[in-house]
Amino acid sequence: MFNDASHVGTVGLTYPIRIVVKANFYIPCTIQFFYKSSSGGIIQGPEHGRVYDNCKAHTFELESQDRITGVEVRTHLFKERYWVIHYIKFTTNTGKEMSYGLRVNTNDSRVKLYTERYKGFHLSYISGFKRDELLTGIQFHWITSDVQYVSTQIKYQLDHAIASAGLQPQSIIRHDVTNCADVQQEVSAELETKAFTSKSWEINVGLTVGTEIKFSAGIPVIATNQVTVRAETSFSYKYGQTETKEETVKRTLKTNVAPKSYQTATMVVIAGTIEVPYTTHLKVVYADGTIVEQSGVGGVYKGVNVIDSKVTYSPTCPLDWAFGHHPERPQQYAQVGFDSGDGKRFYVLPKSYTSQISSIINDSNVNVPGQFIFDTAGQIANADCNTKEGLLTTPFRGSIFDGYDVRVHGVGFTETTYKVMIEEQTIDFCEVASVYITCIMPMLLNAGKNTVKAFDSNSKLSGTTEFISLKPEEYLELILVNSAELDKPIDR
């Protein structure tokens, strides 16, 4: 007689994860079960039976959500002395099947058929009988399927947390802050965008994916410089799934804007990822009301949360030209357009008559079929679109810290996709226009001269230039000493 009960560990928290059967055309020679343990590992059960000639190994691999819910066994009277298993078949809750041996005809009086399938139950482990090392019978031990998990007394191991803060901006929004008055004013604006947070708990035991799990625990979050745990709360979700939530991020901006000028405010939402190991007291509730509990069960929490939002401002741009001088409509914003040349048609460009008209200097319809070409960006270096000389960045210097806009221009960009790199580091967030590329500067490792390269979709180099990065103390000194020069273009 054999019995795998002594190998499976805590009954109710283990289940078969792999079945290896050595079989020939006629019979299964040996059978061996591998079990998912209560600690999350795999327990190798003993091999039962005897290997005959031409017996080949067959492996039935099960996924974490698979449970064996049905079996079929056929036995045959061996040499008129005792019954030997000739055929065995397993079926899972997900519809997978695996069979071994010869499916002998049950009309034969020397053949017996056994089937087992119980609603709300799945296979836990096996025991059985052998004679002359032949498999003569198998007993299948069933447990009721788990319907709910309850996790309490969670203890996070914060010292072993793996966290990353602000490696990638999650959301970017831009807004023009405009002052139409004749004097400097403090202008307020509301910026709002969406960000996504997520959380999930993995537990190192064989739990069924999709089963409800209830938690009473705090939530680990990553702040700017440390990992903390928010106040404890109770919640539930489906085990094995990641709970994702959309979060609204708002910022109220206040900035002093020069008369009849505007600044572009760029808000970048910074998110962080975190993985924290933990231990918990786990309770498994089964369909028949049976409860199995175990303390010290290990797991890993994985989450994404919003850390902060950063706002940067562009240099001040004048708005004087944007207002018309019509005596009856002195505060009406200007229109921008061009005559077709036939004296009849006049094309008005978008943003005309609105407060956004001043940003027309950043627009172009180059490469738009069927339209007249206009290009008001200006300050394009004296370089042909097919050359690599003349690539520029605006500004051409800045902090080593990330989050501010840098415009790459000076050569033509005839494709919709480009890759911009600084010191061999790819800049992830870039928007391509026909005459410039706007990028969010990443964190730079070293201060000084940094090489900027632009590549087209075929990885062909489009141009190179240099960007000067400064440490915070150097940047502050530059502002204090050279503040007057920062308000006008600097000749490089």
Image: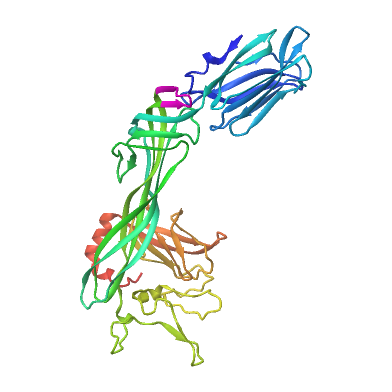
Q: Quadrant of residue 80?
A: top right
List x then y, in percent, for residue 378: 41, 76
Locate the N terminus by quadrant: top right
Q: How is the image coloured?
A: rainbow
Q: Residue at x 30, y 86 (%)?
A: 329
Q: Residue at x 59, y 27 (%)?
A: 69
Q: Residue at x 42, y 75 (%)?
A: 377
List x then y, in percent, for residue 161: 36, 36
Task: Check if residue 415 falls in the magenta segment.
Answer: no
For the image shown, how many numbered marks are present on the structure?
0
Residue lying furthest bottom: 343
Locate the C terminus by quadrant: bottom left
Read off the magenta span: 283-294
Q: Is residue 318 above or below residue 266?
A: below
* Depth order, front residue of 174/209: 209
Left-right relation of 307 to 60: left
List x then y, in percent, for residue 190: 29, 62
* Depth order, front residue of 331/421: 331
Magenta span main SS: strand
Q: Residue at x 62, y 24 (%)?
A: 19
| Residue 403 can be seen in this image | no
Task: Check if residue 292 falls in the magenta segment.
Answer: yes
Q: Is residue 82 above or below residue 427?
A: above
Q: Is residue 453 above or below residue 243?
A: below
Q: Quadrant of residue 60?
A: top right
Left-right relation of 109 to 327: right
Left-right relation of 42 to 213: right
List x then y, in percent, for residue 222: 33, 43
| Residue 95 can be seen in this image | yes
